[in-house]
Amino acid sequence: MKNRIWLSSPHMGGRELDFVNDAFSSNWVAPLGPNVDGFEKDIQNYLSISHAAALSSGTAALHLALILLGVGSGDEVLCQSFTFSATANPILYQRATPIFIDSEEETWNMCPVYLRQAIEDRLAHGKKPKAIIPVHLYGMPANMNEILAISEEFDIPIIEDAAEALGSIYFGRKCGTLGRFGILSFNGNKIITTSGGGALVSKDEMAIQKARFLSTQARDPAPHYQHTEIGYNYRMSNICAGIGRGQMEVLDERVRQRRAVFEFYRSYFRERTGFDFLDEPSGSSSNRWLTCITVDPDKANGITRENIREKLEAENIESRPLWKPMHMQPVFSGTRYYGGTVSEKLFKNGLCLPSGSNISAEELTRVAESIDELY
Ligand SMILES: *Cc1c(COP(=O)(O)O)cnc(C)c1O
């Protein structure tokens, strides 16, 4: 059996262990410390944003953002349907109600037309949604100019899920810095990783201070342990942050590598009909976290997405269907949904190809030739 080709695997830069060793030699083996402070500064500098809190996961960052916006029991939150479940789950942690919004074809992300429709309809029912959560899926920036305009018009803040989009750029600004809050993930399969981790970023200093307070069990200033609020154990460890500091040094290189993977597949399949790649709208630069294709069996000799996935699996190559929209998930059945069939079709016909920054030229060729053999 040929060795396995993974969808997206961790890719260390070289200096990570130095930072981890610093933590060991100073005995900062704790959920706080110099690496956490340094990593937060690195994130702030990279994104050009004034404040960042390093946390245990992107999911934790989303949860804290909702808490900071005062989302609670019975509140409604507008959320992109076409995403990973971690975008929506924290809404339920707060006993609030998600309202799912379909995607647009241009970016595969939240459709501004359905967003407006949802807000107007909810207002007509006497309910004003508390937050909007667009996602930059697979690294492609959402249509933020329109989403931001709607957010301002109706005075509903945005939590930008940039978990997959670290290094993506929208009209000169980094993804994650466009809304009231941005969230990042450093899970093992993301463009850079701390093994597990996340961050909450914002221009709002008070809010990020509050996030740090809530993420360390909400301890009031007192010699004993005193609490007037419910806290969480959501802070990033100083060991993980050390990995993150090393990874930040190679982030731009990782973006270039992922984009090169995308260009390889796109040029390889240029002559093939029935295979489509998502182009960047003008003003947008995607980190191309994962290269995705959509397959039209009518134009691809009857070949379906599943044919390709199964063929790759038989060759010991990992691939994955695009995210199953939240409004189609059993756990969210009965949830309100505004949209058509854009995300449903993407789920039906879309596939993520191996896209790691450490994938070799030989491996890329193996993936492409395996798909080509189906013809
Ligand atoms: C990975 C991911 C998250 C969650 O991040 P974790 O660090 O794994 O908790 C949230 N949203 C999207 C779109 C993601 O891909």
Image (spheres, rainbow, N blue to C red):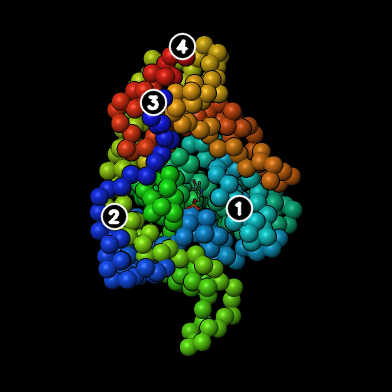
Compute the Cα span from label 3 to label 2.
30 Å
Which is more foreground, mark 1 or mark 3?
3
Q: Going by the image, does 11 lie left or right of 161?
A: left
Taking the spot 41% from the left edge, 64% from the top edge, the residue there is 237
Name the residue beneath numbered marker 4.
375
Q: Quadrant of residue 199?
A: bottom left
Which is more foreground, mark 4 or mark 3?
3
The amino acid beneath tag 1 is Asn
Local SS, label 2: helix
Q: Residues within 10 Å of mark 2 (few under 14, many from 20)?
A: many
Residue 126 seen in render: yes
Q: Earlier in the sequence, mark 4 or mark 3?
A: 3
Q: Residues within 10 Å of mark 1 (few under 14, many from 20)?
A: some
Above or below 360: residue 128 = below
The amino acid beneath tag 3 is Lys
Compute the Cα span from label 4 to label 3.
22 Å
Compute the Cα span from label 1 to label 3.
38 Å
Q: Nearer the viewer, residue 188 or 59?
A: 188
Name the residue beneath numbered marker 3.
2
Residue 89's disc is 1
Q: Earlier in the sequence, mark 2 or mark 4?
A: 2
Local SS, label 3: loop
Which residue is most to the bottom?
Answer: 223
Name the residue beneath numbered marker 2.
16
Which is more foreground, mark 2 or mark 4?
2
Q: Earlier in the sequence, mark 1 or mark 4?
A: 1
